[in-house]
Image (spheres, rainbow, N blue to C red):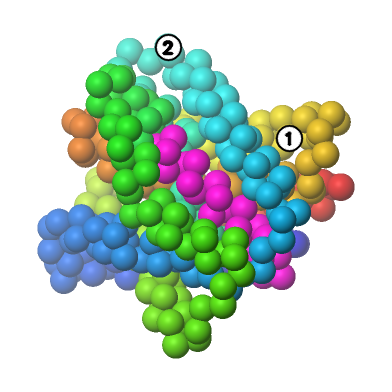
């Protein structure tokens, strides 16, 4: 995909935050609106997006090896970026801010933005969407373990039940048998599922706009750690992912589109889950919010530039 087409696609996604920003600024969205929208996003929109991404998609046993690669490398790559981010931010004296930066450096917006972006950038490759859904299972498990630890620094905060008992993962567990058995879901059922799933991207961007409206602009631009977290998430993470995958490909039969999927996913901006954990567990909410917002704005440029490298992945 050329730079301009990719830039327009990503820009189209990010500008969806503008209505949320202005509605909050003129007080038509009350305080706490982001929390209400987040509940709708997490418990309704994203689970239905997961199901819509699996239902009525053709399954072949040959796909299982690629699914296995996605699962294994999703774990490996997130752990590697986590430790790289810890090393980068280790000199910081502000412990809570450091933890927030580490979390936003490796927790990517896989579900809310990853699937819609993959659909827009590769409309003819439904397998890439499937890989993103599989990756999301691992991401949710890692979020509630390594993600919680990254934000809090306390192992006791990790809730193992949340690895499975979260709405997106439950939705995937429900949908996988239908996918593996190639069960055809009637269009009358698929239509409302698709409508609800399609709310995911607009809702996530509305929430982003609301949070941007509630933030002091100076807080977004005057903190070097926020820029560094965005650099790690948007540049270092995908390039590291690409390098590691190409290295492994010298020894393992890894499909080209598995590498592309992992690379694109790694290029997504920081996930709002880091901010949610900061709010839930008393972390540095402001740094988490600033890092998430900054990386989402900057991805308008970084994703199109990084996608140019996809042409060279043979």
Q: Is residue 287 above or below residue 213?
A: above
* Prevalent SS, magenta region: helix
Residue 17 picture quarter: bottom left
**How far apart in space, not on screen, are marks 2 and 1 (Cα)?**
29 Å
Q: Secondary structure at mark 2?
A: loop
Residue situated in front as seen by the camera: 43 or 302: 43
On the image, the x and y values in percent for residue 289 come to 31, 42
The label on residue 33 is none
Q: Earlier in the sequence, mark 2 or mark 1?
A: 2
Left or right: residue 276 compared with residue 52 = left
Q: Which residue is mark 2?
A: 91
Does the magenta run of residues contain 11?
A: no
Horizontal side of 201 relative to 299 (left or right) equals: left
Give percent across and percent down for residue 128: 66, 58
Residue stretch rendered in magenta on the structure = 118-143
Q: Is residue 113 left or right of residue 312?
A: left
Query: Magenta stretch containing residue 123, yes or no?
Result: yes
Q: Which residue is mark 1?
A: 245
Say if mark 2 contacts mark 1, CB within 8 Å. Answer: no
Residue 22 in sight from this viewpoint: yes
| Front residue (pair 91, 85) | 85
Furthest residue to the front? 181
* Rendering coords of residue 29 (x, y %): 17, 67
The residue drawn where x is 49% and y is 26% is 82
Which of 85 and 209 lies nearest the eye of the viewer?
85
**SS of the residue at dot 1?**
helix
Position of the N terminus, as image quadrant, is bottom right
Question: Which residue appears at 53% of the width and 70% of the height?
Answer: 55
> Mark 2: few, some, or many residues within 10 Å (few <14, many ≥20)?
few
- Residue at 78% over, 41% down: 254
């Amino acid at each position: 995909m050329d730079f301009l087409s990719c830039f327009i696609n990503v820009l189209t996604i990010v500008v969806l935050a503008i209505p949320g920003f202005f509605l909050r600024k003129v007080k038509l969205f009350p305080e706490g609106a982001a929390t209400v929208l987040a509940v709708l996003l997490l418990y309704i929109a994203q689970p239905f997006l997961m199901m819509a991404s699996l239902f009525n998609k053709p399954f072949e046993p040959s796909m299982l090896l690629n699914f296995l690669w996605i699962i294994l490398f999703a774990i490996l790559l997130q752990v590697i970026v986590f430790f790289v981010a810890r090393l980068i931010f280790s000199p910081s004296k502000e412990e809570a801010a450091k933890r927030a930066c580490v979390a936003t450096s490796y927790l990517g917006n896989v579900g809310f933005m990853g699937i819609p972006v993959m659909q827009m950038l590769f409309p003819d490759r439904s397998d890439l969407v499937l890989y993103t859904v599989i990756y999301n299972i691992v991401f949710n498990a890692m979020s509630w373990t390594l993600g919680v630890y990254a934000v809090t620094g306390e192992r006791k905060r990790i809730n193992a039940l949340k690895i499975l008992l979260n709405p997106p993962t439950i939705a995937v567990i429900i949908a996988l048998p239908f996918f593996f058995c190639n069960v055809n879901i009637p269009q009358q059922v698929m239509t409302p599922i698709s409508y609800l799933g399609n709310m995911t991207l607009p809702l996530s961007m509305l929430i982003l706009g609301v949070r941007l409206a509630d933030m002091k602009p100076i807080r977004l631009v005057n903190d070097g750690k926020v820029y560094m977290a965005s650099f790690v998430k948007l540049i270092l993470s995908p390039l590291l992912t690409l390098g590691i995958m190409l290295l492994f490909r010298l020894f393992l039969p890894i499909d080209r589109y598995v590498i592309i999927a992992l690379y694109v996913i790694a290029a997504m901006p920081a996930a709002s889950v880091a901010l949610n954990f900061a709010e839930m567990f008393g972390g540095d909410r402001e740094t988490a919010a600033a890092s998430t917002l900054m990386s989402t704005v900057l991805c308008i440029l970084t994703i199109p530039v990084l996608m140019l490298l996809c042409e060279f992945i043979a």
